[in-house]
Structures are given as C-alpha cells and as structure tokens.
Image (cartoon, coloured by chain):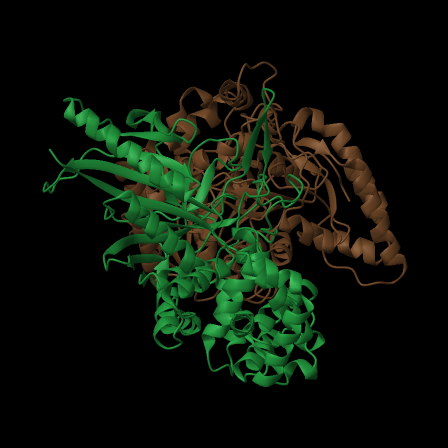
Chain colours: A green, B brown
Amino acid sequence: MKYELVAGLETHVELSTKSKIFCSCTTEFGGQPNTHCCPICIGLPGTLPKLNRSVVDYAIKAGLITNCTINNVSKMDRKNYVYPDLSKAYQISQFDLPICKNGYIELSTGKKVRINRIHIEEDAGKLTHRRGDTLIDYNRAGVPLIEIVTEPDIRSAEEAKEYVEKLQLIMRYIGISDCKMQEGSMRCDINISVRPKGEDKFGVRTEIKNMNSITFMAKAMQYEFERQVDLLESGEEVVQETRRYDDKTNTTESMRGKEDADDYRYFREPDLITINILDSEIEKIREELPERPDEKLSRYVNELGIPEKDAQIIVKYKKISEYFEKAIDGVSSAKTISNFIIGQAFRILENESEKEKFNIKVSPENMRELALLLEDGKIRSGLAKSTLEKMLDTGKSCKEFISEEDMGSIDENTIKTLCKEAVDANSNAVKDYLNGKEKAIKALVGFVMKSTKGKADAIVVENLIKEIIR
Amino acid sequence: MDRMSKISYIHDLLTKKQMSCEEITKKYLEAIDNHNKELNAYITVTKDTALESAKRIDKKISLGEDISMIAGIPMTMKDNISTKGILTSCASKMLSNYVPIYNATVFDLLNDNGSILLGKTNMDEFAMGSTSETSYYGATSNPHNLDCVPGGSSGGGAAAVAGNIAVYALGSDTGGSIRQPASFCGVVGFKPTYGTVSRYGLVAFASSLDQIGPITTSVEDASIVYDVISEYDPKDSTSRGRNQEITFKLLKNSIKGKKIGIVDDFFEYTNENIKGHVEQAIKVYESIGAEIVHIKMSSIKYALPVYYILACAEASSNLGRYDGIRYGYRTPKYRNIDEMICKTRDEGFGKEVKHRILLGTYVLSSGYCDEYYKKAQKMRSIIIDDFKEAFKLCDALIAPTAPKTAFTKNYISEDPMEAYANDVCTVPVNIAGLPAISLPCGSDKDGLPIGIQIIGNRFCDGEVLNIAYAYEQETKNTSFKSVDMGVRL
C-alpha cells in the first residue's frame, strides 16, 4: 500500500523587540546569566505583567505578511504548567482569541500551506544541566514569541522544509525576528501522521518537539514517516504521543504519552486587559510592510534582468538585498552589481551568518561608483574586479586604486607594440610555450598587463601574443 | 479625644507642634510592645525605620515645610503587601523567609506622603480565610474579646486599629477581607472599586477580585487614606485610578434625596440581632432624608459558589510559583526536583490554602472547566448586570457586612462550608468590582461589634464614603463601645 505523510507545523519565532513582552528588560541574546531580569520576569510575588504594545504590532506584521485576518479584539490567557524554567508556573499566552487567524504561505509549486493562527506569548528561561545540578538562567524569560500554527497541509519533508525556509525569510524581511534556529530564536514542533494514499481520514499523530535545524527537521519527518508506515504495515497502531528527535542516531523516541500530557488549565489572564486593535492601526502597519521576498525575486529577474539563481541569493539575505537596491541606483545594468556581490564580496564572507550580516567595508555608493566606471568603458572588468577586492580589504573608494591614466583607453597598436616587446624580452618563456608548456604564455600576458597597469584586456593580449609567436 | 478623624487630629498635633512625630511614633511602638502579645496583630514590627521616618517628618515640620495629611501618621500594612527589605510572609511558612526587593505601589505612595510604617500585620495564610486563624504565625485576637477572632483575612490590621496600636491599616479584600474584620473589630473598612488602587506589589490571591483598601477608625480617615493610594499606576494594567476628584471633598455633601436600596438576599443568613441593627441604621438614613427602595436581585444567591470557584481557580494558578526554587521556604531533604517541589508545597502551605488550590485546580481541569469555571464566569456577568440594574434604581445599597458577629476562636474551623457562608454579604461586591464600606452600627449582647455595609456603583467611591460619613456623623457612634487599650492621645 502507498502511504501519504500528513503534517502540520507549530513554529515559535522569537521577536526582536527591544524589550521583553511584559517588562522593560532587554531581549538581547547572551549576557551573564540572570542579568536581563527584573521582579516581573522572574515572577516575584505581587508583580504584574504589562503588555509591550510593539509585540502586538510585530504579530500584526507577521499576520499581514502571511495573509492572515487580524482579530480586532484579542486577549491573553494563562497556560498553567510546572517547570523550573517557568517562574510563575504559568506561561502568559493566547488560547481562544489569537491576534491573527486564517492565513497561508504559498510554496513554489503554488500550493498554499494554510495558517490556522498566530498568537503571542512569553518565552521561558533556560536550564543548563551540569554535574548533577540544574542551573536556571531567566534572561530569556519573557522574551516575546509568536507561535505560527499551520493546518495539516504538509505532505512531505520537502514541503515542510520549503515552508520553514519561506517563513524564516519573510519574518526576516519584515524585520520582526532574526529567525536563527541554532540560537533558538526559531523552533518548530511537528505534528505528523500517515494514511493510505487516497484516504480522507487522518491517522493518529505524533508530535516531535523542538526541532532547531531545518535539516534535522526534514530527517526527523522522514524517519517518523517510515516508522509509522512500518507500524501500520505490521498491523500495529501508532500511539498518540510526544516524541523527541535524536540527531546522533537519526531516530525519534517517545517522550511522553497522551495520558501524561499536561492539562494546561487555560483561563483568561486576569492581570491584563483586552487587546483592542483598530482597523486604522492594521492599515498603518499594512502600508509600512516591505515588498514580499517572492515579489522582490520576480522584480529582480523580470525587471532588472538578474539571473534567477543570483536573484535568489540576493533575496535570501535581507541585508544584501537592501545593499543591492542602494548600489544599483543610477546603474544601467543591475547585473554588474549582482556580479560584484556574488563574485567578489561573497569571497570574503565565510559563512551564513556573515552573509546575513553583510558587513562589508565597501559602501553601496562606492560600489556604484566602480560599476559606473566599468559601464562607461573607462576600466575593464579585470581591473574592476581587482580594484573591488582592494576596496573590500581597505574600505577605500575606487579612486584610491585607479589613476586617471588607468582610465584612459589603450589603442590596439600600443598593445601590439607592447606584445612584441614582451615576446622579445622573454625568449625563455616563448621557448617554453613553443615546447608545449601552455602556461608559459601567462608570463608574457602578465608582462603586458603590468606595463598597461591592467588596463588591457587579458584575453585580447593573449591572442595577440599567440599570433606573434606563430 | 472627641473628634472622629484620628488622622486629622494627629495632623493638627504635629503641625501645631503640640507633639513631635517621634513622640507619637514611640507611643505606638510602646503600645505594640504592651499589647501585641495578647493581640498577635503584628508579624513584623519595623521599629527602627519607623523612628527614622518620624525624625524626618519632625525635621520637615521644624523647617516649616508643608506636610501631607498622612505625613507622620503611624500605620501598618497587611503582610501580603510587598515592602522592600521587610519580610512579606503572607502569614505562610512558604514565604516565612521572603524579603521583597521592591515596594508595592501603595507603599511607595504612602512613603512619598511621609507615612510611618509601624510594621506588617497578621492575616489568614495568603489571605484565605475569614478568621485570621490560618496564619503560620498563630491566630490574632479580637481586641473586644481576646477569645474571639478578629475576622479575616485582614484580621491583624483590623485588630491593630481597633486596639489602638496603629492609626490605620492597609488590608486587602478579595471576598470581604477588609470589611468583615472591620465589622468584627468595630472599625471602618473600605474596599474601593476594583482598579482604583494599584495591585502592583500585592501578593496575588485572586487577581480579578483582589483590592487594597484602608481600615480606619472613621469614614473621614478612610477617605483621606483612599485619596492618597488611589492613583493610576502604569505598572498595573487593570489600574484606572480614582476617576474623580478627591473623595474628601464629597464627604460632607448632604445625602438628602439619595436613594438607598435594600436587597433581601443579603439578609438571608443574617441573625436577628444584626438584622435589627441594620434596620435601625436604615431608619437613621430615613431620618436624614434618604429614600429607601426595595430591590430584587435574583443572582445574589449564586454569588457564593461563583466566588469560591473563581477565587480558587485564580489562586491555584497564582500560587503555582511557590516551588522553593527561587525564594521562600524549601524542604530540607529531597532526592530530585520533582520531590523538592512536592515536599516544599506540602510542608510550606497550610490546610486551607491546599484546600483552595485543589478546588481551583479541579474547576479548571479539562472536563470540569465548562461545568464549573466557565459557568461561574457566565454567572459573574449576570451578577454584574444585576448590580447595574440595581444602581439604576438607587445610589447605594445597604446590607449587613457579616451574618454573625465575631465568633470564638477554633469555632468555625470544623465546618468549612459554614465558614464560607460567612462571606455571603461581602463576596457579591468583589465579583462585581464595586466599592463598599463597612462601618460600626452597634454591638450585640456580648459587646461584640456589628457592621453595616454601604455598597456603591463602580467608581462611585466618593458617594459610598459620603453616605457612610452621613451615618457616622448622625450617630456619632453612640451605640458603640470602644476598646480600652493602646494609644490614647
């Protein structure tokens, strides 16, 4: 029998508001343990939460960009459970009146993954287990989160992967989170079941908690799919339970069964008042929303003529696309800039996080200046590239490396004369070349390039030299 | 002392330099030394800081600076109101070593106005009870009869004020915890409109019902203290502040033509003696020009179960944080964290608190939530609407504060249901978030005080105080015997 995977995702996204959701402590990541805390976020007796309104605005942004309806009236609820990282023994979350509902994210296939709801809540502290002791750091307690819950619309690990990547990208675009899975600012829970293909009814689902990497998430889904299919094939039943993924063994294991599931005893948070959201507030936020990544991509490809692969790379990093947009202003071929970024700038960016930060020494204005020299034919691409490399090293403008003389064009006769000079002055290299040492020609080309200070076109020079030798 | 406002009397003594604040404060500290053994009203006495504060006030006066009405007035607060650097135990073993690192907003307001904190007063554990017997620090006694309870849960504050070992006290009222002990001790207890006094720093019992208010010897004093503490507080999202000018200005208004409503359901469990006194009070009101109207409120009879379901539900959540991890009591012996939390809670909480946590957890549990908690929430809206309707017909309601006078110690503990029924006249007020005051209207054959309750519409705190003041002025508390104890000025 053929089986189909059915999955829904719950994604927690840590919001990058300056202060926590219910107090004025900083949300900054890191810091000495328990230094970003106050009586409110450690839940001292008698303290009261005060809702940080920008958390609501961030959630509205997230809702609008994912095509959700925004509830004009919303409220906070208490989710009661006991765990040492939860200082009040309840998490302030939203139960039946989330800020956003009924949205979707469209995948590249055109398929829509429906979003059931987006609600706001507070994060818990962090436990560290060391030599039989458990240490608690409440710096993260009270950091605002949104939880984005999909309908069970996902049918493969690939779809899940694309959904999370898209979500990550758009959340970064609207600037509400850095969505770093490895730092925990984005985490996924997967609800997964299988059913025979063609069947309408859902199978019994399991939940895999706290996936902190997209790769592991896909692996975990694949494993869990196969495990459940194996169970059904051998006549056994899938048990509704919470499971944990072990990336070392690439398996999932049971954490707790349905009967051990917490009864959260949700009830309305009496310390907070109703959240009223005016249509005018929603519209204001809608107007301020940036271009969606998919809209941006199609503009880059269709209007700017950037190859799709390059456009995807630029769109993938918000900072890069911002840089790109600034640098192309006034440049007739945006491709020159995209080539500079992907060809040269990327060489010095060692990893994803550096690409995300895109903290290069060359300003968009300076890169534009260089591109214009190239476009006007004042310099050739070889010189442009080497100059850009120097600029990336030093942060200086291209004028520092290119002289007026460099920018004068060299006529063909001068080049020919120089080539002849090169052949005459390097008889050894000529000999080597004629004896079949192809590389020896490079020395001759280099001679010419040096005397023209890189202004000549290396390919033209090479061809000229070859002609002379023959 | 023949005038009724102790605060303005002491204020005059101070400003006319007839007595220094230090002298007055010392008198109160001495009186505490003499009487706290028998009353057990105080858990903590803050002698040194009280004297320091007193000296500061004396200096201000000597420099000719203006001082507020409550500056230099020795007072006390219930031990569930956070005081930086001073034990705030909630009369529980669980918090018997808990010293807050921040002040409740009300305490900041009082400090800003120069009040003198004498100490922190005894109460029922976590404000759960109406006798002040469930305290980890032992029961408080009623100054009128040491064998009787002072009521609760703010029993320590009421006993301290009645026993003249504090000028006034701040208490908290979740289901009657200011008014009922005030009534048992023959003093004035004012529970303001929910939201007018900041709850920031009040250790939560039932967040949607809790409200801080004053216990005083006169309505005028209640008004003076209330005007100081009823400021809007941005730290409390449910805070609204007073919503009107100071109540003190309204106090002496004539109540001629005011309509005072009577709802029979409030009298249902009330004994005949108390009924008689309340009827007497009604006659007094008629005599000074108030119009009496009879009003039906069919939802009042459901107030008690609604209250116990909602209060316990919220309490079960609010008290979840006491796990021995960050502060407070921790069991000495445990093998792992689960055992530590369980044993800490088992050893740290008293019986009544456990009762209510269990009840609250139950009514919120899946499968029972619809039947209990949600139903109670719906009923709460109905009660609120019923009060709204009632206040279309009258300006205030009059009712007994408690169905009985103070009972002897250990009496009620045997039957929890009977204890809960004692709150029948007070809980509807909290459910609807209304202002209500209890004031003395006489005493029973054993000399135990009886209280009447004036209940007003939301944010009509000034009117409630005005109506209560009119009664107090008219009767001059003649039918009432004060306690021969404590400070006499």
Query: Which one is nearer the viewer's eye here, A183 or A226?
Result: A226
Image location of residue B83, percent across then percent down: 68, 41
**Residue located at (55% from left, 32% from top):** A127
Query: Which one is nearer the viewer's eye here, B2 or A348?
Result: A348
Left or right of A430, for residue B314:
left
Is residue B317 among what the camera can see? Answer: yes
Query: Which one is nearer the viewer's eye here, A188 or A346?
Result: A346
Q: To which quarter of the image does residue A243 belong?
A: top left
Left or right of B33, for residue A434:
left
Image location of residue A90, percent across then percent down: 46, 38
Query: Which one is nearer the viewer's eye here, A269 or A34?
Result: A34
Left or right of B284, for residue A405:
right
Q: In this view, does B139 lie above or below B224?
A: above
In the rendered image, the quadrant that contains the N terminus of chain A is top left
Q: To which quarter of the image does residue A212 belong?
A: top left
Count of all numbered marks drawn on residues in the image: 0
Q: Is residue B200 above or below residue A99?
A: above
Is residue B301 among what the camera can see? Answer: no
**Residue located at (82% from left, 58% from top):** B15
Image location of residue A122, percent across then percent down: 48, 46
Q: To which quarter of the image does residue A382 belong?
A: bottom right
Q: In this view, does A279 lie above or below A354?
A: below
Image location of residue B367, percent across then percent down: 26, 33
